[in-house]
Image: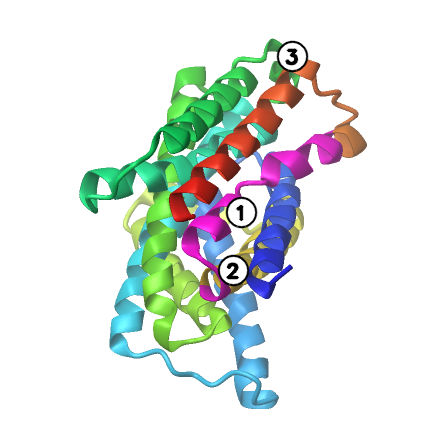
Amino acid sequence: MEIGQAAALMAAFLWTFSSMIWGLIKLPAFTINACKNCVGVTLVGIHLAVASLGLGWVELSADWQAWGWLTLSGFIGVVVGDTLYFRCLQIVGPRRAMVLMCLGPFFAVVLGLLFLNQTISFIVVLGVALTMAGVVVVVLDRKAKQEEPGLMPGNFPLGVACGILAAVCQVSGGVFSAKGMESCSPLESTAIRLFAAAVASSLWMLSRKKYRQEFATAVKFHHLRFIVPATALGTWLGIWFCQMAYKNDDLAIAQTLLSTCPLFAIPVMWVLHRHRVSRLALAGTVVAIFGIWVTVTYKTG
């Protein structure tokens, strides 16, 4: 297994655990995301300072073009995308939210077809259909309702819509991120993405009195005991491994492996919460992952 593929699987594994923790926080999605970005950029900043200034392992080399692409990636993928994902997670639960994120490679194929004049074969259409069918089965599974956090409930169709839009944002952010990493390391690109996200979310938060009050609540120990470990796992380490995957492997392959979170979620949900996944939902998850593999394999083959 190559380093890019291993990094993508590690990112998916870490995101699985962080998603479970995010579902325990009773705060609005944007507030969680803003706090996560501030904590995350601090952790990554320390990591980058030690690696570059202290140990000399990383050379700071990002040019202005890289800053532009990575800033755009941070805004779309981390600010908008993560906020939508957190809202989806709050409504439909972690496992179904992660399955909805499996639509990322599907949207990558569709965007390539619509805007890049790429062709699409029958086998790719079949892979897309399998992915969609698997996602629908899991999302509509009645037994999965017991996994809904219930802390910040909302309309179920809204939760599904947020998950779909989050997948679009993740794919878009991945494309811009891959462009921006042409002149810098994965760690430096992670720091730039999170810095841009922290600045954008902080400015928006400071402009609204309601968000300022919510942020003051978020930084209390009651919430930080969940936010800090979830940020360390999913934001600091998770995004770093994600950037390594984008840097060292084909974007489509990396995106496919990053979409394997639901496979990790099934045993994790059972171990942590004793939630037994129905056979139908398990089959739907496997079908969705298989559909992703078919789509990307024959698209890039």
**Can see residue 199?**
no
For the residues labelled 3 and 1, the Cα–Cα distance comes to 25 Å
Q: How many marks?
A: 3
Task: Tell me which amino acid carries mark 2.
Answer: Ala
Q: Do the residues labelled 2 and 1 touch (CB within 8 Å)?
A: yes
Residue that numbered label 1 is attached to:
258
Dot 1, how many residues are within 10 Å of its Cα: few (below 14), some (14-19), or many (20+)? many
Instruction: Determine if the magenta segment contains residue 39.
Output: no
Q: How far apart are marks 2 and 1 (CA)?
A: 9 Å
Percent position (x, y) of residue 33? 46, 47
Which residue is labeled 2 in the image? Answer: 245
Q: Which residue is drawn at 48% across and 19% down?
A: 133
Which of the 4 image quarters holds residue 197? bottom left
- In the figure, 137 relative to 288: above or below? above
Q: Is the magenta region chiefly helix, strand or loop?
A: helix
The residue depicted at 38 percent of the width and 49 percent of the height is 77
Image vertical order of residue 119 relative to residue 197, above or below: above
Q: Say left or right for 179 vs 57.
A: left
Picture coordinates of residue 73, whole percent (x, y):
34, 56
Q: Residue 154 carries which label?
A: none
State which quarter of the image contains the N terminus.
Answer: bottom right
User: How many C-alpha atoms fall within 10 Å of the one at disc 2: few (<14), some, or many (≥20)?
Assistant: many
**Residue at position x 50%, y 44% from top?**
256
Amino acid carrying mark 1 in the image: Leu
Q: What residue would you read off at disc 3?
A: 143
CB under 8 Å between callouts 3 and 2? Answer: no
Considering depth in this image, is 2 or 138 the residue closer to the camera?
2
Mark 3 residue element? helix
Q: Where are the magenta residues, as a range?
A: 247-269
Q: Earlier in the sequence, mark 3 or mark 1?
A: 3
Task: Say which label, 3 or 2, has the lower sequence index.
Answer: 3
